[in-house]
Amino acid sequence: MAPTPEAWHEAGHALAAHLCGGTVREVTLESELDDHGGHVAVEWRPAGREESARRSLTVALAGPIAELVFVGDDALDDPDAASAWRADWAEAESQLAQLSDDAEERTAPRRRAVSELRRSFESADGYARLARIADALDAHETLDETLFFDALGPD
């Protein structure tokens, strides 16, 4: 059976965090945080404000992008998906505001992040990694660091 869109969503956040240099400590479909269906706990190395904003932007957008890769662009018309992504979009906008006060100047980094995520997740290797992580999430609901790396496969 194919993994759920929710599993793909959280797998996207986790894979993006890993690709941005973070250490994924846990990824779960059962978050204790209010208004979050899932959660990814990441340990980051210290970074400046701009680098922190860029990687947080990427991780925030990665859940919806992974879900789009799995479900297809028709998900954009799904009100349930749009509602579920609200927190991710708000986080992305918050991080973009760290990069610039000008709304027009925030367009380029947003588009670049979305394009890079789609390219990464739609590649054969990226898609396979997302699928393995999503499968493991569906099987276990929560992946600790070891289970995440087992599902991630080789770099």
Image (tube, rainbow, N blue to C red):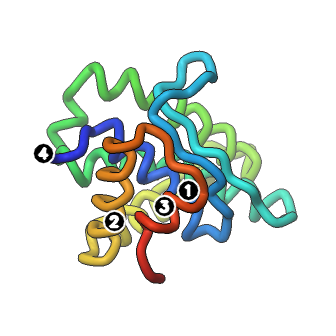
Earlier residue among tags 1 and 2: 1
Q: Measured from the top left, where is residue 134 in percent x and y?
A: 34, 51
Q: Which mark is residue 121?
A: 2
Earlier residue among tags 4 and 2: 4
Label 4 Cα neighbours within 10 Å, binned few <14 / some 14-19 / many ≥20 = few
Labels 1, 4: front one: 4
The answer to which of 135 and 91 lies nearer the viewer is: 135
Q: Are marks 2 and 3 in contact (CB under 8 Å)?
A: yes
Q: As shown in the figure, which amino acid type bears the numbered disc 2?
A: Phe
Say what secondary structure mark 3 lies in.
Answer: helix
The answer to which of 143 and 61 lies nearer the viewer is: 143
Q: Which mark is residue 1?
A: 4
The CA span between labels 1 and 2 is 12 Å
Earlier residue among tags 1 and 4: 4
Quadrant of the frame with the N terminus: top left
Horizontal relation, residue 146 to residue 56: left or right: left
Horizontal relation, residue 84 to residue 74: left or right: right
Say what secondary structure mark 4 lies in.
Answer: loop
- Residue under the point 31% across and 28% down: 81
Q: Are marks 3 and 1 in contact (CB under 8 Å)?
A: no
Say what secondary structure mark 1 lies in.
Answer: helix
